[in-house]
C-alpha cells in the first residue's frame, strides 16, 4: 500500500472549503450549488400564484388561509457542480523531486506530477465533500485515463487511487489531448487543468485548447505547477540540455547572463498566459513545488479566489 | 612514379597532431535533463536576435574547418604570385658608374661635394633593394659599366658579398664603355635561358644601343633625375701674344632652366677677371677675356653650384710666347730657310759637316757644342751629321721636336699611283696631285708614326709623337723633287712649324680622365706622381697617385688620374731630386655633362630579330623600364603562407573550443 495521496490531517480542513464558482450552475443532479433555476432546494426564492400543474407540495397553505389566494412557494434549485480535473502526466512533469535538485527537505521533495496530483486530489475532495460531481482525466499527448464522474465523499478514495495511478511519461500535447470529444466535459462546470504548460505550440496552443473548453461551458482554472529548477535554474558550466520529452539536446555554456535571459523569458511566457486568461476570465495560478501543499492550497489557491469557505 | 614537387607540403603534417589535440581537449558538455526546451529555445532566440553573428557562431567550427580545408586545397595547388623585379636564376646586374652618375640625385643642389646624395648613392640603394628580393637559387653577376667593363662578381649567391661590392662603387669620369659593357653582358648571357639583364643607369649614354642584339630579357632601372640643372665650361683657352693673353670660353647650359652666373677667371690662383653671363637652357655663350697677364695656368670657374660639378671649372695653359727658334742643320736650302722665316721662326743654321773626307773619330772630337739657347725645334735637312749622336746632342734631339727631311740609307723608286694626303695639322691647306719626289728612303714607319703623304701604297712622310715629343719625318730630300717650288710649300712649312711647337705650353693640355697620355719624361726620372693642384680633384681631396714605372724608369706613356681637375705630374730622379713637372687638366668625358637630355634606352632586337620593346615601340618619357618580358618576373610561392594561415585557423578553432561559443 502506497502512501496516501493527501495527508489525512488535511482532509477535515479541505472539507471546510468549497470551490467558489462564479456562475450559477445548471446540472442535472441535485447538488449543493444553487442553480439558476427554481428547484427543490430549501432556499426560498419567490412566491407566485398557483397555476394548475404546479407541485401541490409547494402550495402555501398558510397564505391561502389568510388571504384565500393560492400561492406557490418557489425555491432555488440546488444543483451539483461538475468539476473536471485534468492532470498532465507528460514526462516534463516528472521534475522537481529532491533527486534532481539535491534538496532533501520534505516539502520540496515532491516532483511536479506528485504536487499536481495532490492539488487535484484536494480540489476533488473539496468538490466531493460539497456534493459536486467530479471527473478526472490524466493526459499527455492523448487522454491516458479517465475517471467517470463520481459523487460524494465516499468516492474520494476512488478519485485518489485514480490520481495515484497516473505515472509520468510520454510527450505532452495539451491541444491534441483535450480536443478529443471524449475528453471534453459533457456538461457545463468547472475545469481544472494541472500542468506545467510547457507547450510546443506555446500560448497559441493553449488558447486554442481553452477556447474549446470555454465553448463547452467551462469555468477554467489553470494551475501551472513549476519546480524551483524551472523558475530559477541553478545551472552552470557547459551543459547539454536534454529535453525530457523530445530527447534532443542543446549545448549551452551557462552563464549568469543566460540565466537572466531565461528568467526574463519565463516571466514573459507567464505574462502572456496571464494576459490571455484575464481576457477570457480564466483563473491562472502559478504554484511552485517548493511551497508546501497546505500553503499551496490554503493560501495560493484561496488567494486566487477560486476557493471559498 | 609518384613524386613530390615540393616537400614544403610536409609542414601540413603539423596540422594533424594539432587537430587530434583539439579533439582530445574538446570541451565536454554535461548532459542535463530538463523538462522542456520551450523556454531555452526562447532564450537562445533572444540571444541570437541580440547578436546576429550568433547564428554563424553556431557553426563557427564548421566554417573554420571549411577554411582549413580550403587552405589545404589552396596550398596543394602550389600557388605563387608573380613578383616583379624579384631575382631568380642568373641575373647580370650592370651598374653604370659613368661620370654623370656623380650628379646630384633629383636636383638636390650640390653644396658640398661630400654630403650631397648623388645618383650613384641612389643606385646603391636600388641595387640593394633588388638584391634583397634574391631567391635562394638566384645568382648575380655584377658588371661595372665604367671606363672599361669590369666583372666585379660572377654568379655570386651571397647577398652580403654583392652588397659589399656595390657599396664600393665610385664614379668614373673617363669615357664610359657603354657598348663594350653591353657587348660583354650579351656574351655573358649567351646561351643561358635563365639569364636576365638589369641595368641600373641614368640612361645618359653617349653611344647607340638600339642595335645591340639581346637574347635575354632586359630591364632598365632608370635613375634619371627629373629637372637637372647643369652649366658647363664647354671650352676654354688662352692665347698669348707676348705677355698679354686673350681668354675665350664657351659656356653651355645643358639644364632645363636658364642660368645666370658669374664667371671667375684665375691666373696662377689669383683672380684676374669676373664676368657675368646669362645662358638660356640648351644654348651656349662665348665669353672673351681681354688683356690677361701672363700666368702658367688659368682657371675659369662658374660661380653657381649645379647638379654636376666636375664640368664647372676649366683650365688653360699659356702658350710660350714669341717666335720659335729653329735649329736648322742643313747643307743649305734657300727655299726651306725662306719658308721658315716666313712662318716667323728664328732660324739658326748649322752645317752638318764641312769636311767630308776626314776621319770619323776626328769629326767626333770636333762635335760642336749644343746651342746655348735650347732650340724650340730642330730641322735636319738631308743626311744627319755624325756629331748628332755624340755628347749632349742625342738628349737634345730626344727632348726637342724635330723635322727630318731625307737622310741616308737605301732608296727606292716610289711606286706608281696616286699621291694621297692624309688629314693632319701639317697637311692642312695642302693638295698634292702628283708625287713630290722621285726617290724614297726605304725605311720602316715607327709605331707612333701616322702617315701624312703616301705615293701609291708607300708612305712618303709621317708624323707622330715619340715620348711626348712631336716628330715629323719626310722620307725624301727636298732636293729630290719639286716640292719647294710649289706654291703650297711655304704653307706646309708654316703648318709644320706650328704643329711641331704646339707642345710648347706650360701644361700638357686637356685630357679625359683615365685615358693614356704620352708625357715627355726625362731620362733621369725613375719615379713620379700625380698631385692634385686645383679644381674638383683637390676639393674632393684626391690623394697623390704614383706614376706608372717600368724597369726602374718612367715610361713616356702614363695614365692620367681618374678624377677631373688640375693635376701636376712630378717626376723624380734616382736621387729623389724633383725634376721639371707638367701641369695637366683632367676632364670628365664631355658627353656626360648633358644632364637631363637623356633619352630612354632602347636595345636592339632579341633573338627573333624583334625590337625589345614589348609593343614593338621604344618606351618613352618617364617609364622606368623599357621592356620587361614575362621571365623578368619571378614566382613567389604562397604555399608557406597557406600553411601559416591554416595553422592560425586551427589555433583559432582551439580558442572556440575554449570559450564554448559553439552553441
Image: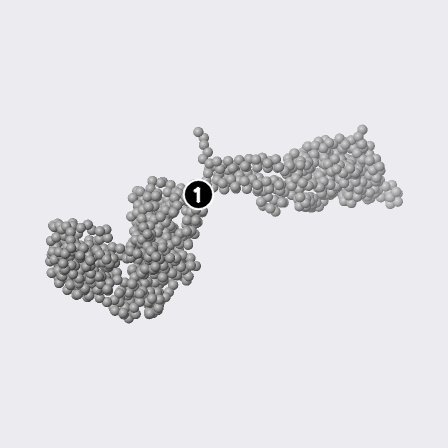
Residue B489 on image: x %, y %: 14, 61
Q: Is residue B179 left or right of residue A252?
A: left
Residue B175 on image: x %, y %: 32, 54
Quadrant of the image occupied by residue A81:
top right
Depth check: B214 or A298 in front?
B214
Residue at left 41%, top 62%?
Answer: B111
B383 vs A42: above or below: below
The local crowd at label 1, few if under 14, some if 14 to 19, many if 20 or more residues have their Cα within 10 Å, is: some
Depth check: A51 or B589 in front?
B589
Residue at left 24%, top 53%?
Answer: B448
Q: Is residue B592 visible?
A: no
Residue at left 25%, top 57%?
Answer: B395
Q: Secondary structure at mark 1?
A: loop
> The N terminus of chain B lies in which quarter of the figure?
top left
How many numbered marks, from 0 up?
Answer: 1
Residue that carries the numbered disc 1 in the rendered image: B135
> The C terminus of chain B lies in which quarter of the figure?
top right
**Label 1: chain letter:** B
Q: Is residue A175 left or right of residue A306?
A: left
Residue B138 on image: x %, y %: 42, 42
Question: How did the renderer colour the structure?
Answer: one colour
Depth check: B424 or A105 in front?
B424
Q: Is residue B558 left or right of residue B169?
A: left
Residue B567 on image: x %, y %: 34, 60
Amino acid at each position: 500500500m502506497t502512501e496516501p495521496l493527501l495527508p489525512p490531517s488535511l482532509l477535515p480542513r479541505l472539507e471546510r472549503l468549497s470551490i467558489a464558482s462564479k456562475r450559477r450552475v445548471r446540472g442535472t443532479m441535485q447538488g449543493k450549488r444553487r442553480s439558476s433555476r427554481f428547484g427543490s432546494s430549501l432556499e426560498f426564492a419567490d412566491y407566485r400564484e398557483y397555476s394548475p400543474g404546479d407541485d401541490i407540495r409547494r402550495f402555501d397553505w398558510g397564505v391561502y388561509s389568510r388571504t384565500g389566494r393560492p400561492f406557490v412557494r418557489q425555491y432555488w434549485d440546488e444543483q451539483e457542480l461538475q468539476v473536471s480535473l485534468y492532470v498532465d502526466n507528460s514526462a516534463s512533469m516528472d521534475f522537481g523531486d529532491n533527486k534532481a535538485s539535491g534538496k532533501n527537505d520534505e516539502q520540496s521533495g515532491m516532483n511536479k506530477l506528485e504536487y499536481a496530483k495532490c492539488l487535484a486530489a484536494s480540489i476533488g475532495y473539496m468538490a466531493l465533500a460539497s456534493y459536486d460531481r467530479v471527473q478526472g482525466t490524466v493526459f499527455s499527448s492523448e487522454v491516458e485515463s479517465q475517471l467517470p464522474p463520481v459523487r460524494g465523499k465516499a468516492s474520494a478514495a476512488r478519485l485518489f487511487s485514480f490520481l495515484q495511478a497516473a505515472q509520468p511519461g510520454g510527450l505532452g500535447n495539451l491541444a491534441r489531448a483535450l480536443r478529443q470529444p471524449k475528453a471534453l466535459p459533457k456538461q457545463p462546470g468547472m475545469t481544472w487543468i494541472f500542468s506545467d504548460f510547457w507547450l510546443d505550440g506555446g500560448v497559441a496552443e493553449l488558447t486554442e485548447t481553452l477556447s474549446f473548453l470555454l465553448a463547452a461551458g467551462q469555468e477554467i482554472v489553470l494551475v501551472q505547477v513549476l519546480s524551483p529548477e524551472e523558475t530559477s535554474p541553478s545551472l552552470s558550466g557547459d551543459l547539454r540540455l536534454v529535453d525530457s520529452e523530445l530527447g534532443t539536446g542543446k549545448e549551452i555554456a551557462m552563464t549568469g547572463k543566460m540565466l537572466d535571459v531565461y528568467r526574463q523569458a519565463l516571466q514573459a511566457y507567464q505574462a502572456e498566459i496571464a494576459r490571455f486568461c484575464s481576457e477570457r476570465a480564466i483563473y491562472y495560478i502559478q504554484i511552485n513545488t517548493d511551497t508546501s501543499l497546505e500553503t499551496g492550497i490554503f493560501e495560493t489557491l484561496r488567494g486566487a479566489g477560486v476557493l471559498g469557505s | 612514379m609518384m613524386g613530390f614537387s615540393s616537400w614544403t607540403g610536409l609542414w601540413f603534417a603539423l596540422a594533424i597532431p594539432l587537430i587530434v589535440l583539439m579533439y582530445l581537449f574538446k570541451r565536454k558538455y554535461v548532459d542535463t535533463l530538463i523538462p522542456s526546451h520551450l523556454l531555452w529555445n526562447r532564450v537562445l532566440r533572444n540571444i541570437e536576435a541580440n547578436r546576429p553573428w550568433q547564428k554563424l557562431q553556431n557553426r563557427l567550427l564548421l566554417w573554420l574547418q571549411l577554411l582549413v580545408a580550403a587552405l589545404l586545397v589552396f596550398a596543394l595547388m602550389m600557388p605563387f604570385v608573380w613578383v616583379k623585379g624579384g631575382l631568380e636564376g642568373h641575373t647580370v646586374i650592370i651598374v653604370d658608374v659613368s661620370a654623370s652618375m656623380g650628379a646630384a640625385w633629383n636636383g638636390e643642389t650640390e653644396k658640398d661635394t661630400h654630403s650631397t646624395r648623388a645618383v650613384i648613392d641612389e643606385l646603391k640603394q636600388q641595387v640593394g633593394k633588388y638584391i634583397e628580393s634574391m631567391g635562394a637559387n638566384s645568382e648575380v653577376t655584377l658588371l661595372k659599366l665604367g671606363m672599361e667593363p669590369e666583372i666585379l662578381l660572377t654568379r655570386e649567391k651571397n647577398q652580403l658579398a654583392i652588397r659589399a661590392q656595390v657599396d664600393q662603387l665610385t664614379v668614373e669620369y673617363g669615357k664610359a664603355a657603354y657598348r663594350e659593357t653591353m657587348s660583354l653582358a650579351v656574351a655573358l648571357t649567351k646561351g643561358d635561358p635563365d639569364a636576365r639583364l638589369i641595368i641600373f643607369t641614368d640612361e645618359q649614354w653617349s653611344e647607340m644601343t638600339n642595335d645591340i642584339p639581346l637574347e635575354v630579357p632586359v630591364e632598365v632601372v632608370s635613375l634619371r633625375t627629373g629637372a637637372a640643372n647643369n652649366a658647363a665650361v664647354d671650352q676654354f683657352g688662352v692665347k698669348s701674344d707676348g705677355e698679354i693673353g686673350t681668354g675665350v670660353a664657351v659656356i653651355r647650359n645643358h639644364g632645363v632652366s636658364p642660368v645666370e652666373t658669374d664667371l671667375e677667371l684665375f691666373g696662377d690662383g689669383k683672380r684676374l677677371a669676373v664676368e657675368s653671363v646669362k645662358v638660356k637652357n640648351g644654348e651656349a655663350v662665348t665669353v672673351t677675356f681681354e688683356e690677361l697677364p701672363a700666368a702658367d695656368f688659368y682657371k675659369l670657374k662658374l660661380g653657381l653650384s649645379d647638379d654636376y660639378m666636375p664640368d664647372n671649372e676649366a683650365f688653360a695653359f699659356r702658350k710660350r710666347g714669341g717666335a720659335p727658334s729653329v735649329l736648322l742643320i742643313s747643307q743649305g736650302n734657300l727655299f726651306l730657310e725662306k719658308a721658315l722665316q716666313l712662318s716667323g721662326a728664328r732660324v739658326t743654321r748649322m752645317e752638318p759637316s764641312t769636311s767630308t773626307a776626314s776621319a770619323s773619330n776626328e769629326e767626333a772630337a770636333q762635335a760642336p757644342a749644343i746651342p746655348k739657347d735650347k732650340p724650340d725645334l730642330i730641322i735636319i735637312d738631308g743626311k744627319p751629321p755624325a756629331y748628332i749622336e755624340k755628347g749632349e746632342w742625342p738628349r737634345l734631339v730626344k727632348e726637342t721636336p724635330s723635322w727630318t727631311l731625307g737622310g741616308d740609307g737605301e732608296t727606292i723608286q716610289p711606286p706608281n699611283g696616286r699621291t694621297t694626303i692624309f688629314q693632319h695639322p701639317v697637311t692642312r691647306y695642302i693638295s698634292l696631285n702628283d708625287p713630290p719626289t722621285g726617290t724614297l728612303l726605304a725605311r720602316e714607319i715607327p709605331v707612333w708614326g701616322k702617315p701624312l703623304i703616301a705615293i701609291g701604297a708607300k708612305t712618303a712622310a709621317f708624323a707622330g709623337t715619340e715620348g711626348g715629343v712631336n716628330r715629323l719625318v719626310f722620307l725624301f730630300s727636298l732636293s729630290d723633287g719639286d716640292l719647294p717650288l710649289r706654291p703650297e710649300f711655304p704653307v706646309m712649312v708654316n703648318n709644320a712649324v706650328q704643329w711641331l711647337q704646339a707642345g710648347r705650353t706650360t701644361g700638357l693640355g686637356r685630357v679625359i680622365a683615365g685615358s693614356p697620355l704620352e708625357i715627355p719624361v726625362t731620362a733621369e726620372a725613375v719615379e713620379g706622381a700625380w698631385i692634385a693642384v686645383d679644381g674638383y680633384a683637390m676639393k674632393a681631396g684626391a690623394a697623390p697617385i704614383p706614376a706608372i714605372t717600368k724597369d726602374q724608369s718612367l715610361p713616356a706613356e702614363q695614365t692620367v688620374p681618374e678624377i677631373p681637375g688640375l693635376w701636376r705630374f712630378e717626376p723624380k730622379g734616382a736621387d729623389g731630386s724633383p725634376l721639371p713637372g707638367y701641369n695637366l687638366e683632367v676632364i670628365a668625358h664631355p658627353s656626360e655633362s648633358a644632364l637631363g637630355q637623356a633619352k630612354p634606352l632602347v636595345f636592339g632586337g632579341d633573338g627573333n630579330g624583334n625590337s625589345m620593346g614589348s609593343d614593338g615601340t621604344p618606351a618613352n618619357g618617364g617609364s622606368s623600364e623599357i621592356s620587361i618580358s614575362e621571365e623578368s618576373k619571378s614566382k613567389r610561392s604562397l604555399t608557406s603562407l597557406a600553411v601559416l594561415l591554416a595553422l592560425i585557423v586551427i589555433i583559432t578553432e582551439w580558442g572556440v573550443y575554449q570559450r564554448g561559443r559553439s552553441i
